[in-house]
Image (tube, rainbow, N blue to C red):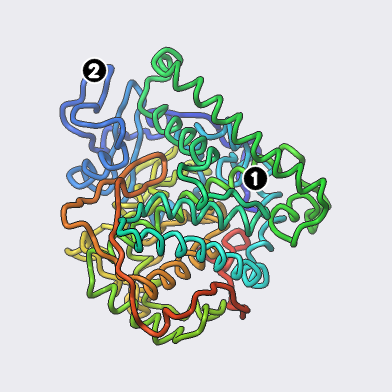
Amino acid sequence: MADNRAGTGTALPKGFRSAEQGWPELDRIPHPPRRLPLLGDVLGVDRRTPLQDSVRLARGLGPIFRRKAFGNEFVFVWGARLVADIADESRFAKHVGLGVANLRPVAGDGLFTAYNHEPNWQLAHDVLAPGFSREAMEGYHSMMLAVAGRLTDHWDRELAAGHTVDVPGDMTKLTLETIARTGFGHDFGSFERSRPHPFVTAMVGTLTYAQRLNSVPSPLAPLMLRDATRRNAADIAHLNRTVDDLVRARRESGRGDGDLLDRMLETAHPETGERLSPQNVRRQVITFLVAGHETTSGALSFALHYLSRHPEIAARARAEVDRVWGDTPAPAYDQVAKLRYVRRVLDESLRLWPTAPAFAREARKDTVLGGEHPMRRGAWALVLTPMLHRDPEVWGADAEQFDPDRFDAKAVRGRAPHTFKPFGTGARACIGRQFALHEATLVLGLLLRRYDLRADPGYRLRVTERLTLMPDGLRLRLGRRTAPAQAAAALTAPQDAVSAGRCPVHGMGD
């Protein structure tokens, strides 16, 4: 476990700290022009799109800049050299920033929202890490295929009726059912519903509310968001009830199939023998259900958008699927990792629009960022991932263009570390990274093999922000392929294994 304490033996400060408290030379860091007294840097910004506003400002202000809102100052970092420095685990740790802290009423000290000094995240990580091992991932594969079959059945019906498909909506159904089935043995029946499952509605409500809190002065939030606060309380209560019912059903029915919920309920820490408390189980289940599907659905939606806009790239990816999978009824587990170009499409989509678009880091001790900017112990900065992924010094003058070949093996080897961070960094990086990548690569392969993806010529990409990112209003028209590989209807298969990703908590890299 990483040491999250400074030399004095006391825990790092927690709670929100404006940048003036931690950056002694803050005046050297640029900020937007036309700063207003009291209000700060609010001219020309939209409270619904704070991330995209920050990206726009970053282009003119450079690799480190600051913004002020209602008396609170924030420092943003995106230059590759500075991000590589702030990723140093010996000097910096995860900081639970405002947006993430706003989720603590529902997720508490879950894996994503825990403060570094709270012990439950490390306990949960060590107990649950085997749930993402090679053997566990192999076991999830057939369930992923089964859920993907429900998606293609739905899309086949939409195609036959001459309808377009709601890409973000359907990807959300797919990924929710996948994490619910593989992790908790539960079926939300998403594809049998004409409207989103109430769990999804409540989840979107809590994420949107957390986002809104970022743009409202803290003292005025109870007054300005009175109705929204009541709705948020109801949303949290629904999420809690849903998870409590799920856990209760498992306890009453006995052991499941060794899934994540079984591990939460039955597994003791391998060294201490400690088990997850009932409250911790609830928080981890909510964390996995929300984080385990919200970000993956966004990644798939952006990838399908770019594939529909670049038919030559879609044709190349489809040819790889046909070559690697052939006319097998359904791909085996080890065949998914062989879709190297499809994976590049996914990575390039995550480069341009990382669905978890920022992560915060705090100084473990007094230090100097990049050899230029002094930071006191506990000072923090927000890494603006979409701008890191567009740094022209790393990605070239055409960094705004969609080009999956940026991720061929030679190009990846030629780039410096810490330049591609869609899953965060260090000890607190996403535990489910390999799960998400396997699921998304599998689904893209299945959809490319089955359909031609046709964009609406009038659609222009709009991005919805609710802490995570999602294309807004994206619909595609489908064409049915006639390739031999499409004759197979069953989406269940035996599985073979490939090596799962390395775990950053145990010092084996990101």
On the image, the x and y values in percent for residue 47 come to 30, 30
Numbered tag placed on residue 333 in the rendering: none
What kind of element bears circle 2? loop
Q: CA distance from mark 1 to mark 2?
A: 42 Å
Q: Is residue 53 visible?
A: yes
**Closer mark to the observer between disc 1 and disc 2:** 1
Mark 1 in CB contact with mark 2 (< 8 angstroms): no
Residue 424, percent from left and from top = 46, 54
User: Residue 406, position in %: x, y?
Assistant: 30, 71
Q: Nearer the viewer, residue 440 or 366?
A: 440
User: Which one is earlier in the sequence, the residue at label 1 or at label 2?
Assistant: 2
Residue nearest the observer in this picture, 482 or 2: 482
- In this rendering, the answer to whether 510 lies above or below 229 is below
Where is residue 486, by image quadrant?
bottom left
Residue that numbered label 1 is attached to: 284
SS at mark 1 in the image = helix
Q: Amino acid at mark 2?
A: Pro
- Residue position for label 2: 37
At 56% across and 79% down in the image, what residue appears? Answer: 332
Instruction: Indicate whether 169 appears above or below 395.
Output: above
What amino acid is labelled 1 in the image? Gln
Please state which of residues 151 and 176 is positioned toward the viewer in this rendering: 151
